[in-house]
Image (cartoon, grey):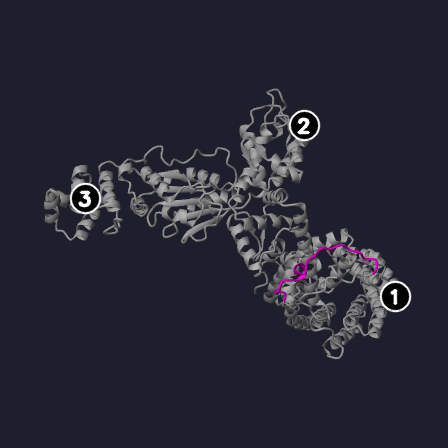
Amino acid sequence: MKARCRVPPRTTSLGPLLRGYRHAAGMTLEELAERAGVSARAIGDMERGRSRGPQARTMEALADALALEGADRAALLVTARAGRRRPKDPAPGLCDLPPDIPDFVGRDKERAWLARAGDSPGGPRVAIVSGGPGLGKSALAVHAAWQVAERYGDGRFFIDLRGLDAEPVAPHQALSRLLKALGIREKEIPADTDERRALYGRLMRDRRVLVVLDNAVGEAQLRPLLPGPGRSTVWVTSRRALTGIEHAARLPLGPLPAAAATSMLGTIISSHSVIINTPHDSIVGGRDDGAATDDTPDEAADDTTDDTALREIADRCGHLPLALRIAANRLLSRPSWSPRDLADRLAAEDLRLDRLTAGDLHIQSAFTLSYAQLTPELKLLFRRLALVPGPDFGSALGAVLTGLPEPRTEQLTDELVELGLLVPTTGDRAAFHDLIRLYANKRLHDEESPEDTRAAGTRMNDWLLATARAAGQWFEPDKPHDPTPHDPDAPGASAQPGDGEPSDASSAAATPPTGLHSQQAAREWLEDEGHNWFAAFRAASQEGRHTTVVAVAEAMHWFSDWWIFWGHWPEVFARSHAAAHALGDTRTEAVHLNYLAWSLQVCLGDAAGSETRALEAERLARQAGDRAQQAWALLYAAHAAAALQRPEDALAYGERAAELFREAGDKEGHPQALLGTAHDLTTLRRPHEALDRLRHVLALVTDPASAPAPHIADYAVANTLRAIGTTHAGLGDWAQAVTAYRQALETGPRVGVPNLRALILHGLARALYQQREYAQARPALAEARDLFHASGNAAKAAEAEAELRDWGPPDRHDG
């Protein structure tokens, strides 16, 4: 039967410990003396602290008399022996720190964090450094431990828990090694794990010891090795986040910053290279004794070339410390190589992992240790996620790739994040490190057939495109939102004549996520998965799937107004126009040529190119007999002419567009055309006519009989009120401008377009400033700047930032 502690002593001093055991046994001083054959005076001196190092036989007799067993007996005997001889250092050769790393570079903030961790009164005594393979967790912990070694005079211990081995170090074994390092003799170490843990906790309580537990596999292995309250500190490294450990300080480790990664390469090369006048000279500073001390132009050029090459090497190593060290060692082992030689060799992605090898150091080995521990489901998800073209992904995409239920892929994704094989990004999304993505792709091609890989990629692309169409439809006026849209390219779909596009998409792949239940949810999905659905769209275009390309771009038309500064709309609509042309549909070609004209002007500022496409679209629309598309073409031509400082042409285009919209009954285009003509009237110095037209637009979009779809009407109201404010500002009517801008802001939240709200706030701030309302103007301008940044409008953000500087500090106008 396992012996249990009679009393949990709160001290490791002999006197209180002995007195506590005597009281727990219910004995008087005299009774204990009689049973042990030790004088009562001697026992009293021990309990009062006058005798701190009694003989071993005396303590054995007292332990027998108190019937102490297991951890209790060991605690009493060890404490007595410590009083007889307390060495300054722990037992040598046991759990020693590995040697320091002389060429350690970077991680200054992380080292400072570790130095503080566990050293603040009342703070956690456990610090956990976690992250994926190759990040240098162990190197950081060892180097930081040497830097603070003098603080821990009672011992600095290190144990590799071998968390990636088939059989990691058991807590029972690790406790034995720690107890020996603390001075406990083999025969005094309890056989029971709980008793070892109790003894370890007592010994650590009053000592100042640093314990580095490297490469922990999980919480179950780690918990018995945490000593509890006291003066000692424990640092843990693990590929897992170990989120189950409570009351711990945490440091999730990432790759080095770019500058530190490049510096690490140069430092390793400099500290290890002994060859002079090799291609390394420009890095390590080595020269012949007779060399000139001043750089010649050629030498300066070589320095620049090497610096550039080192940065490229660092980038191709993903700034991972292990990969950087391998690259540096590989360069050192090849004196004939320059940094440019290695940078060029690492440029090939399919060979990069194989080339990041130096002796017995292999970057792939670090990844393989983690991969080997995964379950079959985790391995499948890890491999298949390599097919995702964008920088990150959510669990829904993982479900499409693997065929597993989405709740299960969400759990598996969390597990891969916990293991450091994925890194969390925004929300519930995750991403690969660059080198780990290459490794996942290698595992995919080594372990799965080309047919399975191709089928998974096709399923992903079809799902992305079908979901993008479903999401985009939320922004279309007066169109029902079909939660499972028809895929024109899916098997059995009726393609247009001459289409003939291959697809093996399954019905499941065309089913969008159930979360697309609102316009906001649709917008979030389109933005979150933007890189991914755009890559699928590009692939469909390259494969000649013209019907799909046109359908997806059509679904994006109205949404593009909500996400103007995305950056890819010109390519989207150029591809859809080409697809429409290939289909031989004149009207559809005019529609997508109009979309291209819009994107060239709004996204790229290419007014001349926009006008050319718009006038060509007008010709095609007239040929097809579509007045609405004629009107849109003329509207885009008007915008282009205005940007080219031809306001008379812009007004003529706009007024003709407005008339065609009215004739076609297009409630969405009509107010937009009138809004554009108001701008042209202002440019032509006819502001009062412009205000009349703007008020007419406001009436149109707020009258139920003529208003467009509600979300488009809200946008038009906010934009029109902004234009009214801008026109009043041009007239110097600052109070009326402020009123109009504030009314526009009231509509803005329903629109949810950051750039539009930023434009309104920008105008409001300027008007308030002119009214000397400085306390209100500055916050409005600062919010506008932040919203411009959020929407990707860098030019306007810089403009607002410059104005904030010109306005000076907030208290500039006080008094």
Q: Which disc, if any, is residue 780?
A: none
Residue positioned 87% across, 60% down in the render: 616
* Disc 3 to disc 1, C-alpha distance: 105 Å
Q: What residue is shown with label 2? A: 296
- Upstream in sequence: badge 2 or badge 1: 2
Tell me the crowding category of disc 3: few under 14, some 14 to 19, or many 20 or more residues within 10 angstroms, Cα based: many
**Numbered circles on residues, count:** 3
The amino acid sitting under disc 3 is Ala
Residue 766: x and y, percent? 67, 65
Tell me the crowding category of disc 1: few under 14, some 14 to 19, or many 20 or more residues within 10 angstroms, Cα based: some
Q: What SS does tag 3 mark?
A: helix
- Upstream in sequence: badge 2 or badge 3: 3
Residue 230 relative to residue 256: left or right: left
Tell me the crowding category of disc 2: few under 14, some 14 to 19, or many 20 or more residues within 10 angstroms, Cα based: few
Q: What residue is shown with label 1? A: 624
Q: Nearer the viewer, residue 477 or 162?
A: 162
Q: Give the range drawn in magenta.
A: 497-516
The amino acid sitting under disc 2 is Thr
Split into 4 quadrants, where in the image is the C terminus?
bottom right
